[in-house]
C-alpha cells in the first residue's frame, strides 16, 4: 500500500496538470493564419472621369489668341458694301430730266462735281443755271435765280427760286447713250442740253434745247430779245433755221467753255 501512494500522487498531479492545460487552451482564442480574403483591401483610386480637370498637368502647347482669331466661315470685311439684290446704284454724274410745279421742263447735267441746268416751258420762260453737285447736294445759281436740291438713288428733287417765286421740281436720270464719244456728258450719256453756239450768240441770237428721253425736244430761241418756241434741231447737224437764219447749237457740258 505504501508503494502505491507515490504513484497515485504522481497520477493525480498529472491529471491535474492535464485539466489545467485543457482549460487554459479553451480560454485563449484560436490563432488563425491570414488569408487573401481576410487581408485589408487597398484604397480604390477615384474613377478617371471624376478627376478634376484643373488638377491635370498643363499641356505644353501654344494656345490661339482670342483677339486675333476669327471664325473660319466668316470672310474678312473689306469695307465694301454691295447694293441690295445685286443692282448697281445709278451714278450722280449724268443727265437728270424732270419738271417744275409750273409745268416747265428742267434738265441738269452733272460731270466732275460741276453742273449745268436749263429750264424752259417751250414758250416764253427759260433760265440757265450753273453750280456744283457734291455728296448728292445740288447748288446752282443763275440770273436772279437759285436752285437747290438733293439726289437720292435714282431721283433728284429740290426747289428753284426766281425773285419771289418758288417752284419745286423732281427729275430722274436719262440713260440715253451717246453715239459719239466726243459729245458725251455726265456719266457717259448723250448730251441732254444744247445751246446756240458762241458765234450765234454774238450775233444777238440765243437758243436752248432739252433732248427728252422719248426723242422729242423742247426749247426756246431768243430773237432780238423776244423768246419764241424753238424749232427742233436737226440731229445730223444739231442746227435749225429761224427766219432764214441757220442756228447751230452745241452740247452743254459742265466745266466746258
Image: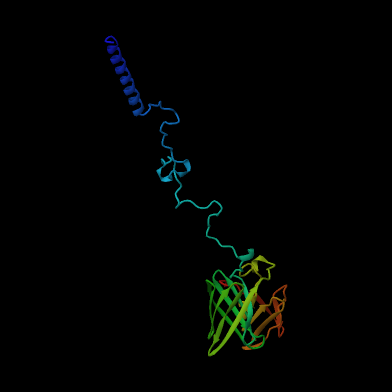
- In this view, the residue in front, 71 or 124, is 71
Q: Where is 106 relative to 79, above or below?
A: below
Structure colour scheme = rainbow
Q: Where is 104 relative to 2, above or below?
A: below
Image x and y of residue 1, in percent = 29, 10
Q: Quadrant of residue 103?
A: bottom right
Q: Quadrant of residue 44?
A: top left
Image x and y of residue 130, in percent = 55, 77
The residue shown at (71%, 82%) is 231
Image x and y of residue 34, in percent = 41, 27
| Residue furthest top as drawn | 3
Location of the C terminus (image quadrant): bottom right
From this viewpoint, is residue 87 visible? no
**In the figure, is residue 8 to the left or right of 42?**
left
Q: Where is 112 relative to 102, above or below?
A: above
**In the figure, is residue 110 to the left or right of 228?**
left
Amino acid at each position: 500500500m505504501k508503494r502505491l501512494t507515490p504513484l497515485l500522487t504522481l497520477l493525480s498531479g498529472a491529471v491535474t496538470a492535464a485539466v489545467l492545460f485543457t482549460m487554459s487552451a479553451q480560454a485563449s482564442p484560436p490563432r488563425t493564419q491570414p488569408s487573401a480574403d481576410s487581408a485589408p483591401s487597398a484604397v480604390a483610386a477615384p474613377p478617371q472621369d471624376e478627376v478634376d480637370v484643373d488638377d491635370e498637368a498643363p499641356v505644353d502647347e501654344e494656345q490661339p489668341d482670342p483677339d486675333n482669331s476669327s471664325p473660319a466661315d466668316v470672310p474678312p470685311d473689306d469695307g465694301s458694301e454691295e447694293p441690295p439684290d445685286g443692282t448697281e446704284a445709278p451714278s450722280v454724274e449724268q443727265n437728270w430730266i424732270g419738271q417744275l410745279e409750273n409745268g416747265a421742263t428742267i434738265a441738269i447735267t452733272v460731270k466732275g462735281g460741276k453742273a449745268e441746268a436749263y429750264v424752259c416751258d417751250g414758250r416764253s420762260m427759260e433760265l440757265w443755271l450753273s453750280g456744283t453737285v457734291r455728296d448728292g447736294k445740288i447748288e446752282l445759281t443763275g440770273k436772279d435765280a437759285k436752285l437747290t436740291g438733293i439726289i437720292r438713288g435714282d431721283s433728284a428733287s429740290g426747289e428753284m427760286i426766281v425773285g419771289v417765286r418758288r417752284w419745286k421740281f423732281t427729275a430722274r436720270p436719262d440713260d440715253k447713250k451717246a453715239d459719239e464719244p466726243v459729245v458725251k456728258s455726265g456719266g457717259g450719256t448723250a448730251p441732254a442740253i444744247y445751246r446756240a453756239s458762241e458765234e450765234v450768240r454774238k450775233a444777238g441770237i440765243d437758243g436752248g434745247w432739252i433732248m427728252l428721253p422719248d426723242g422729242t425736244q423742247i426749247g426756246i430761241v431768243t430773237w432780238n430779245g423776244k423768246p419764241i418756241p424753238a424749232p427742233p434741231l436737226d440731229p445730223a447737224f444739231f442746227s435749225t433755221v429761224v427766219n432764214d437764219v441757220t442756228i447751230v447749237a452745241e452740247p452743254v457740258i459742265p466745266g466746258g467753255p
